[in-house]
Amino acid sequence: MTTPATPSTPTPTPTRTTLGRTGPTTSALGLGLMGMSDLYGPADETESIATVHAALDAGVTLLDTGDFYGMGHNELLLHEALRGRDRASVEISVKFGAQRGPDGTWLGYDASPAATKSALAYTLRRLRTDHIDIYRPARLDPNVPIEETVGAIAELVKAGYVRHIGLSEVGAETLRRAAAVHPISDLQIEYSLISRGLEVEVLPTARELGIGITAYGVLSRGLLSGHWQGDRAVDRTDFRSHSPRFQGDNLTHNLALVEALREIADAKGATVAQVAIAWVASRGADVVPLVGARRRDRLAEALGSLRVELSAADLAAIESAVPAGSAAGDRYAAAQMAHLDSER
């Protein structure tokens, strides 16, 4: 089994790309910060900040957070990590709209114009910045037309508080309606070897409209990392403790897919995670993988994916090992799947 890159190994630098036709120029690989505050069990804050620093030093400039990750903690952590750094050298992407109680309970979504503007006010204060590079609702609010939400963010763009408008987990029709109001830089959506639903309709529509893709979940919450063990104990606060793909026979089936992928990775002198990330990056220049590394060693491994070149034969072998639709279990529990406009 191939070991991840060590600190002595020169770190590859991500190339630069533009998100969609109208979005910002950013690194072609981004860092998702959610797990540093929430949903994957306890995290070490000092190590999290060190990981952000390592990413910045390696040339990763796209940093993705959400105001509801840890009920504001993630934004405060990002502010601390950026202390003393050049704000103009990074692109901060923020999701908003998810409502939570003081105990972390999920209470629904609010992307009304008033809530949109209020949420941004608090985000700007927590991050100690005067603008957000990409601002996006985390999900489609079923009670608010997307035109109203995008229109409110467009007013914030005009006022200088937001640079670009993004969306997250919406379907093709919603993309069209949103883009008719204001240019959309990118759609953030789960995309991995075992989460490929967007390929049917959403991805072609995004490309038609000139909207980039920022792909989260490229390792399917760690399932495709090559490090997950079937008998691993999971903290009750961990998303994976109730994720269908990590349960019982589903997990056994999915880990067999990982082992098939490992054979390909070993033959290339890479890790499973590196091949899985490289596969997402191979989907097109308009697709930017977001890696959710919480530690420097995992970040170093993810950055090693930039060295992995997948030939046509490699891609065919990967497709044979992990065909589209081969995963067992949905990517969310039923209640959460119901909030995904992208899956309708």
Image (spheres, rainbow, N blue to C red):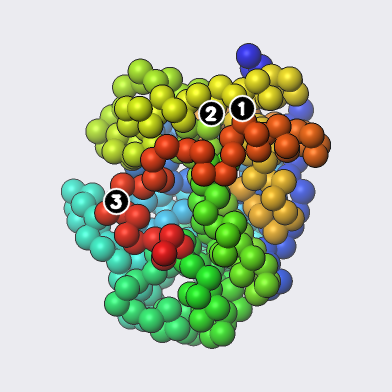
Query: Can residue 338 be seen here?
Result: yes
Q: Which residue is drawn at 56% across and 85% down?
A: 180
Sort mark 3 into few (<14), some (14-19) or many (20+) by Cα contacts within 10 Å. Answer: few
Residue, disc 2: 257
Residue type beneath disc 1 = Leu
The location of residue 138, given as percent across then percent down, is 41, 62
As helix, strand or loop, the secondary structure at mark 3 comes to helix
Quarter of the image with the C terminus in it? bottom left
Task: Pick whichever of labels 3 and 2 is earlier in the sequence.
Answer: 2
Horizontal side of residue 260 vs 120, given as left or right: right
Q: Is residue 36 above or below residue 342?
A: above
Q: Where residue 20 appears, x then y in whole percent?
A: 68, 67
Query: As rendered, which of 321 and 214 lies closer to the eye?
Result: 321
Residue labelled with disc 3: 334
Q: Of the residues shown, which amino acid type is indicated by label 2?
A: Leu
Is 7 above or below relative to 307?
above
Label 2 crowding class (10 Å Cα cut-off): few <14, some 14-19, many 20+? some
Query: Given contact means CB atoms under 8 Å apart, are the residues at marks 1 and 2 in contact?
Result: yes
Question: Quick one: quadrant of the N terminus?
Answer: top right
Binning the other alpha carbons within 10 Å of mark 1 as few (below 14), some (14 to 19) or many (20 upward) gives many
State whether residue 4 appears in this view: no
Residue visible at 27% across and 54% down in the picture: 335
Calculate the distance from the C-alpha at mark 3 to the C-alpha at mark 2. Answer: 23 Å
300 on left or right of 250: right
Question: Which numbered marker is on residue 261?
Answer: 1
* Of 155 and 273, the residue lying toward us: 273
